[in-house]
Every structure is written in C-alpha cells, then in structure tokens.
Amino acid sequence: MKIHATAIVDTRARIAPDVEIGPYAVVGPDVEIGAGCSIGSHAVVTGHTCLGQRNRIFPFAAIGGAPQDKKYRGEPTRLEIGEGNTIREYCTFNCGTAQDVGVTRVGDDNWFMAYVHVAHDCQVGSHTVFANATQLAGHVHVGDYVYRERACPEGNAGCRESPFGDRLDTWVADFFAPARPLLAANGALLVTMLVSGLWHGTTLAFLLFGLAHGLYQVVYRSWDTFLVVRLGRKRVRALRERLGVRLAGMALTFNATAFAFVFFRVDTERLFDVAVSWLGAA
C-alpha cells in the first residue's frame, strides 16, 4: 500500500494492499477501496462509500459526501462505485437519501471529466462519458453507453437519457427513457437472431425459431439491467451464485430451449397445434 505521509486515512477504512493514496488526501472510516485504485492528492473519499477495483480518483475530487438535500438527517446512506472508472479533478459524488433507495450507484468503465456532479440517489450505468461540468440532479437514472457533452437543461427530464444534449434527441428521449439505450441494443439483437433462424430455412417455422431465441435474449438482458440498477452489481453477482437461483435458471433455460425447438422440428402446417399442446402439457 502506497500512502503518502501527509494523507489522512482513518484506520477503520478497508483498503486493498496495492491502493495508492496521494499527498493530503482524506479517506474516512466507512470507506472501502478495492484493488488497483488510486486516490489523487487533496481528494476526499468519505461517507459510506465503496469503490470497486481499478478506479482512478484525481486531485481535489469529493467522493461520498452527504447529499445536498434539506431532508437529509444523517442516515447511513451509501455511494457504490463499480470498477475501472475515471473520475477527474473537482468531481463531486454524493451518497443517497432515505427518501429514495438510499444508494447512489455508478457502474463500470465510466469516464467523468472535471467538475462533474453526481447527486444523491443517481443510478449511472456503465461505459458512459460525462464531459466537463455535466451536472446530474438527484434521482437521475442514466443507462449504459450514454454520452453527455453539456449539463441537462433545468426541468427537462428527458435529457437524462439523451446522448447529444438539449436538441431533438432530448425530445425523443422524453418518450423512450429510461429504456432508450436498451431498446437500441435489443433491436440489433432481434435482427441477428431472426437472420440466424432463416439460415436454417425460409419457412415460418425457422423464422419463429430465430425470433424466440431473440426474445429470450431481450428478456434476459432487460431483467439483468433492472436487477443491477435496483440491487447493484455485487449483490446481483452474489445472487447468481446461490444454488436455488442456479437450478431455477437451468430449468427455465431448458424449457425455453425445448419450446423453441418445437418451431425447429415441426412442419409449418402442424406448428400451431403442436405449440399449443406443448404449452398445455407444460
């Protein structure tokens, strides 16, 4: 562990052995810092804050401070940051509030440029880019792969899912948020699986075979995204390791795959009758 002599690090903080902490940095007692992280000079990491692996906190950032909300009464709310994030100078990330889920969450591999503010109870996905001085008010949800080049206009809720700012895309995002990034990815996935089905043949049965597999993928991805936003990545990973969850997943996957093979093996003329009888038996 490389901790500069002038840094103030509470002995109760849980810090991985290879973490680097620069001059005059401050780390509070309820902080957890994962392996491979670096905390720049004069940065402050406080509150009930958990940093995953390989995060880089640059000088003068303020991470895990109390929410800027008059209703806050000192509740032990949290800030959870995933892995591989870059948080540049003077960024401010606040913990959650008891009036919401109580946790501000940031996913993996995000890039926060200088002066970015992530307020209480925000839920930020993964692989996003926030340019200088972007400001997120409380309770804002941002999906994966979103790019923001300027601050959201006050009172414009759709801006939170728009990758291009307060132009036409903001208006579009008002109608498709918060599923806009997910819908774009799922559309391409459905087309891919449809083409895969047609590779076996050009009948309706093969088309439905590909569509069924595409819908399975869409449902799985949507449910996985929902769980990560609500529970956080660490809790979702732990949930997947439980024996009961794994057995239920195997059973569901087997039955879904067996149902899809109804379309693959049955003649188009008998397709509807066989599918109905299979569902009745199940």
Image (tube, rainbow, N blue to C red):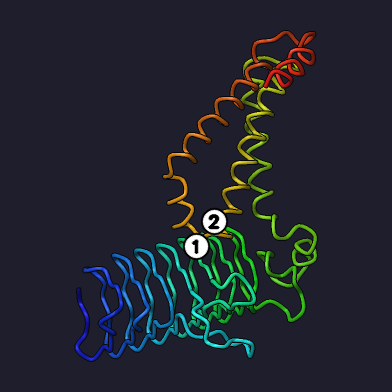
Which of labels 1 and 2 is toward the front? Answer: 2
User: Relative to residue 84, is residue 251 depicted above or below?
Assistant: above
Q: Is residue 267 left or right of residue 69?
A: right
Q: Is residue 67 left or right of residue 191?
A: left
Which residue is nearer to you in this view: 188 or 50? Answer: 50
Q: CA distance from mark 1 to mark 2?
A: 9 Å
Q: Secondary structure at mark 1?
A: loop
Q: Quick check: marks 1 and 2 in contact, CB under 8 Å?
A: yes
**Label 1 sits on what residue type?**
Gly
Residue with the mark numbered 1:
107
Residue 203, image x, y percentages: 74, 14
User: Relative to residue 235, is residue 91 depicted above or below?
Assistant: below
Residue with the mark numbered 2:
228
- For label 1, the crowd category at 10 Å Cα-Cα, with few meaning under 14, some 14 to 19 and many 20 or more, is many
Which residue is nearer to you in this view: 53 or 13? Answer: 13
* Rendered residue at 48%/85% (across/down): 65
Q: Is residue 232 left or right of residue 51?
A: right
Residue 54, image x, y percentages: 34, 65
